[in-house]
Image: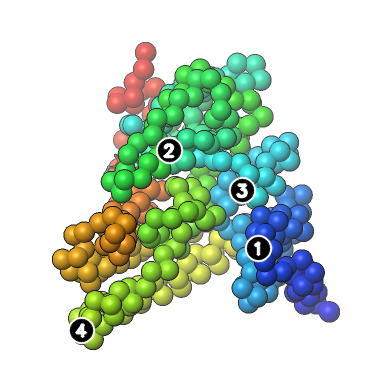
């Protein structure tokens, strides 16, 4: 028997022996993780099986054909994926299993009031003190910071290096004195993101991911996970969370069918509406194919700007779907609240589309990446790129 057929058989046997219809999903997830089916391409000592692409896809097909969740965390679990790629053995031992089981609440401490698109301009500072680093600064737009156990933090560890080179990446404990989290209210009415003020808080040196002052490269890997997930996640009406949307708060894919809305509104025979519905369908289909291309490149070990393409396309799709939903509802779309669920969902979709067009890097930034990395256009001029960060005028410090 080939290694692929043996694996397929093993996966089928596992499902037969462990899965049952009413099984508690947390219990199922634990079985999947402990039997190392959750992250097939990761190394064996990180709850993976070290499979190549062909083997992993064959196993994934067994689960998806049975309609059962299980594998896939190696593609979308940015928290554990970043740790597996860059963490120390102790840190992996401590967190990988718990992250795969969703037992650790995480957040991303990247953006600052003066550094969003230009993340290399961060000013939050880490200063070494024995076996620890002392952190001071402010982060903003931090989804899920309230209640988070760990933040993936970028902080400046060397002000004398150029902006991209003096940054380090930490697994930062959130529940400690010196970390103040203040929720922000969003246009949707949700309060999923926060300001985080950090004053003399501490993080062990052992929680450094990657090399000191090389955090920019760890960040690129973490951002690629995030963009890939956002490129395929069809964020829609409000609801509880799902694993792939973990980074920016959690909203599941909508199962809302605009065709059904069109039928209910008596507009499903309108030619223009039919064209728009077909257009939306095609945009989604093409983006799914793009997602497959990006996945194939990243699974072959490359990092792909195609993830930017997918994220940008998904942003367009979500805006288009929000507009179309409102158009289908007509004047009723002006209503809101629980008494008008369809209008409420349309309004929410409209506003929430900005989630994908801003979070994880704005549409304009994705276009820059596509221009430079896919179309081969010249890079934007960056006058501060090679100077020591301390001397960059806007950020100069005493
Ligand atoms: C829902 C949501 C959740 C978020 N969650 C998190 C989180 O958990 N953690 C976190 O760290 N951050 C998070 N963010 C922050 C997000 O990553 C930033 O908002 C984003 O990167 C943009 O940064 P900024 O807001 O500082 O805007 P700016 O960078 O100030 O940009 C302002 C405008 O200028 C444009 N622009 C800037 N530079 C260029 C350029 N070079 N070329 C062309 N146009 C440019 C931008 O596209 C934008 O339109 C979240 C944001 C949202 C909306």
Q: What's the distance in space between the residues labelled 1 and 2, CA to CA?
A: 28 Å
Question: Which residue does the image show at 23% across and 65% down from the upper left?
Answer: 326
Q: What's the distance in space between the residues labelled 4 and 2, CA to CA?
A: 43 Å
SS at badge 1:
loop
Sequence order check, earlier mark of 1 and 4: 1
For label 2, the residue is 142
Sequence order check, earlier mark of 1 and 2: 1
Q: What's the distance in space between the residues labelled 2 and 3, CA to CA?
A: 19 Å
SS at badge 4:
loop
SS at badge 3:
loop
Picture quadrant of ligand 1 = top left
Question: Which residue does the image show at 65% across and 50% down from the upper left?
Answer: 101
Q: What's the distance in space between the residues labelled 4 and 3, CA to CA?
A: 46 Å
Residue 185's image quarter? top left
Sequence order check, earlier mark of 4 and 3: 3
Residue 140's image quarter? top left
Q: What's the distance in space between the residues labelled 1 and 4, CA to CA?
A: 42 Å
For label 4, the residue is 270
The answer to whether residue 276 is visible is: yes
Q: Please tell me the numbered disc located at residue 102.
A: 3
């Amino acid at each position: 028997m080939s290694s692929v057929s043996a694996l397929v058989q093993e996966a089928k046997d596992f499902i037969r022996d462990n899965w049952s219809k009413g099984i508690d999903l947390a219990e199922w997830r634990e079985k999947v993780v402990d039997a190392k089916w959750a992250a097939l391409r990761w190394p064996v000592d990180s709850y993976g099986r070290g499979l190549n692409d062909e083997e992993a896809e064959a196993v994934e097909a067994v689960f998806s054909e049975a309609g059962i969740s299980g594998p896939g965390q190696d593609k979308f679990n940015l928290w554990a994926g970043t740790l597996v790629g860059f963490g120390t053995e102790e840190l992996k031992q401590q967190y990988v299993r718990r992250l795969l089981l969703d037992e650790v609440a995480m957040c991303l401490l990247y953006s600052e009031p003066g550094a969003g698109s230009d993340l290399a301009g961060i000013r939050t500072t880490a200063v070494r003190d024995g076996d620890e680093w002392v952190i001071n600064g402010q982060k903003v737009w931090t989804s899920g910071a309230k209640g988070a156990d760990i933040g993936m933090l970028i902080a400046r560890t060397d002000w004398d290096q150029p902006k991209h080179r003096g940054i380090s990446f930490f697994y930062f404990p959130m529940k400690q004195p010196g970390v103040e989290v203040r929720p922000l209210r969003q246009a949707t009415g949700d309060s999923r993101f926060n300001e985080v003020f950090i004053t003399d808080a501490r993080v062990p040196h052992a929680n450094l991911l990657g090399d000191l002052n090389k955090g920019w490269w760890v960040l690129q890997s973490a951002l690629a996970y995030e963009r890939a997930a956002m490129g395929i996640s069809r964020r829609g009406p409000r609801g509880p969370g799902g694993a792939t949307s973990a980074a920016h708060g959690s909203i599941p894919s909508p199962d809302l069918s605009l065709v059904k809305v069109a039928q209910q509104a008596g507009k499903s025979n309108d030619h223009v509406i039919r064209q728009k519905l077909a257009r939306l369908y095609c945009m989604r289909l093409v983006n799914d194919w793009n997602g497959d291309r990006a996945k194939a490149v990243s699974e072959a070990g490359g990092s792909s700007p195609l993830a930017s393409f997918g994220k940008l396309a998904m942003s367009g799709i979500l805006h288009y779907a929000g507009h179309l939903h409102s158009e289908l509802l007509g004047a009723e779309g002006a209503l809101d609240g629980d008494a008008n669920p369809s209008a409420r969902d349309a309004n929410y979709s409209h506003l929430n589309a900005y989630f994908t067009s801003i979070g994880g890097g704005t549409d304009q930034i994705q276009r820059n990446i596509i221009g430079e990395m896919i179309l081969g256009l010249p890079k934007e001029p960056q006058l501060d790129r090679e100077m020591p960060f301390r001397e960059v005028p806007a950020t100069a410090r005493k």
